[in-house]
Image: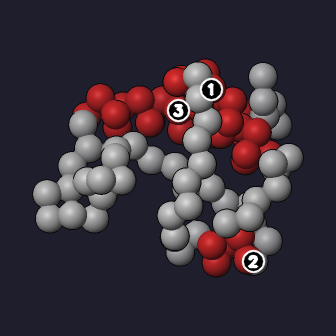
Amino acid sequence: MDVPREAAIIAAASAACRRASGRVMGVSFGSDASAMTRAGIPTIIFGPGSIDQAHTADEFVAVAEVARAARMLADMARRFASGEGAE
């Protein structure tokens, strides 16, 4: 998905990622969310776990990673809703 770096969702997600882990990382995975981007809705994909376990017969995500992702999503939502964006 090609979402401008200045999009509010990118600023909010980047700030939340930096705050939680000190890093921001993009990947080149496919998703149905690309349809939203094509429709003009800036969209990101975010979630816990390792791509090595994703979509496998024994897929799993550690509970601690789910909890951390939930905190990050709450931070992103707060930033996005307030227009705060990056720190």
Q: What residue is disc 3 on?
A: 72
Mark 2 residue crowding within 10 angstroms, few (<14) / some (14–19) / many (20+): few
Quarter location, residue 58: bottom left
SS at circle 1: helix
In the image, residue 12 lies at what x, y percent?
71, 37
Mark 3 residue crowding within 10 angstroms, few (<14) / some (14–19) / many (20+): many
What's the amino acid at mark 1? Arg
Q: Is residue 8 above or below residue 34?
A: above
In the image, residue 82 lies at what x, y percent?
78, 34
Mark 1 residue crowding within 10 angstroms, few (<14) / some (14–19) / many (20+): some
Q: What residue is disc 2 on?
A: 39
Residue 51 in view (yes/no): yes
Q: Which mark is residue 18?
A: 1
Residue most extreme to the right: 6
In the image, residue 74 lies at what x, y percent?
55, 34
Tell which circle, 3 or 2, labels the residue nearer the N-terminal end: 2
- Look at 59% across and 29% down and name the residue there: 23
- Look at 63% across and 73% down and name the residue there: 34
- Look at 78% across and 22% down and name the residue there: 87
Residue 76 in view (yes/no): no
Tell which circle, 3 or 1, labels the residue nearer the N-terminal end: 1
Give the foreground label among 1 and 2: 1
